[in-house]
Amino acid sequence: PFMLRRTKELVAAELPPKIENTVLCAMEPHQRTAYQHWREHFRRTILTSLDTVGLQRTRMKVLEGLMKLRLVCCHPALIDDQYKASSGKMDAFVEMLDDILAGGHKVLVFSQFVRMLTILRKHLDERGITYEYLDGKTMRRQERVERFQNDQSIRVFLISLKAGGTGLNLTAADYVIHYDPWWNPAVEVQATDRTHRIGQTKQ
């Protein structure tokens, strides 16, 4: 037996185009210092572990180090509560968000890290920007979706990638920001398709 599968392009040929951009940004100076500190810390830890217990038992330390460095790239405050400076990626996000909101658009913002979403929430609260929020612990998900879809004053939706990658219809948005890349691009595509689906009329 075999299965026939119709692609979205065939089922919804009227969908407007989806334009994707990768935004590159430099680390903020304090952030770069933090990154170099943690890079050296994990380098020493891993080399010591290799010498004492070997490669097999060091693999998890390598993965832990890579994950921590990814967090520093997002925002050093994710691993250091005392960090008070900015983040190059956060600065780029704020600039991008300002342009999107100034243009009257709605935007979905995905992150795989709930703590990163917390930092973004704090920024929006300080700016007085109304938003919706969804992570794995959010109750009454559909109510959040309907508010975002129908309330013109709510133009930002912060979403945990794991919790909001499927099953949501958010066609009111015409921008999607993935704050941090996921190792599996298909997951990002699924998340983006919360807005690029039947019912979407804007590019």
Image: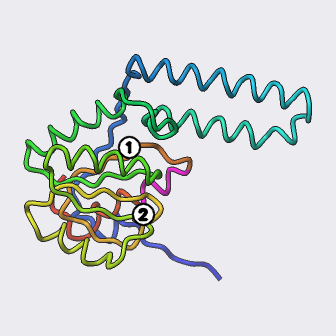
At horizontal 36% and vertical 51% (from top left) the residue drawn is 118
Does residue 170 belong to the magenta stretch?
no
Helix, strand or loop for disc 1:
loop
Closer to the camera in the image, 196 or 83:
83
At horizontal 19% and vertical 44% (from top left) the residue drawn is 126
Does residue 188 belong to the magenta stretch?
yes
Query: Residue 147 location, x and y as percent?
Result: 17, 71
Residue designated by label 1: 179
Total marks shown come to 2
Label annotation for residue 94:
none
Does 51 sit left or right of 171 as displayed? right
At horizontal 47% and vertical 43% (from top left) the residue drawn is 181
Tell me, yes or no, whether the two marked residues, 2 and 1, touch with CB atoms within 8 Å. no
Main secondary structure type of the part rendered in magenta: helix
Closer to the camera in the image, 135 or 20:
135
Which quadrant holds residue 48?
Answer: top right
**Above/below status of 19 relative to 77:** below
Find the distance from the CA under tag 2 to the CA under tag 1. 14 Å
Query: Residue 90 location, x and y as percent?
Result: 33, 34
**Above/below status of 69 relative to 29:** below
Question: Which kind of residue does numbered mark 1 sit on?
Answer: Tyr
Please tell me which of labels 2 and 1 falls first in the chain: 2
Does 3 sit left or right of 136 as displayed? right
Does 39 sit left or right of 158 as displayed? right
Which quadrant holds residue 24?
Answer: top left
Helix, strand or loop for disc 2:
loop
At horizontal 50% and vertical 33% (from top left) the residue drawn is 72
Task: Specify start and end residues of the magenta stretch as a single range.
Answer: 184-190
Query: Residue 76 location, x and y as percent?
Result: 46, 33
- Quadrant of the frame with the N terminus: bottom right
Label annotation for residue 165:
2
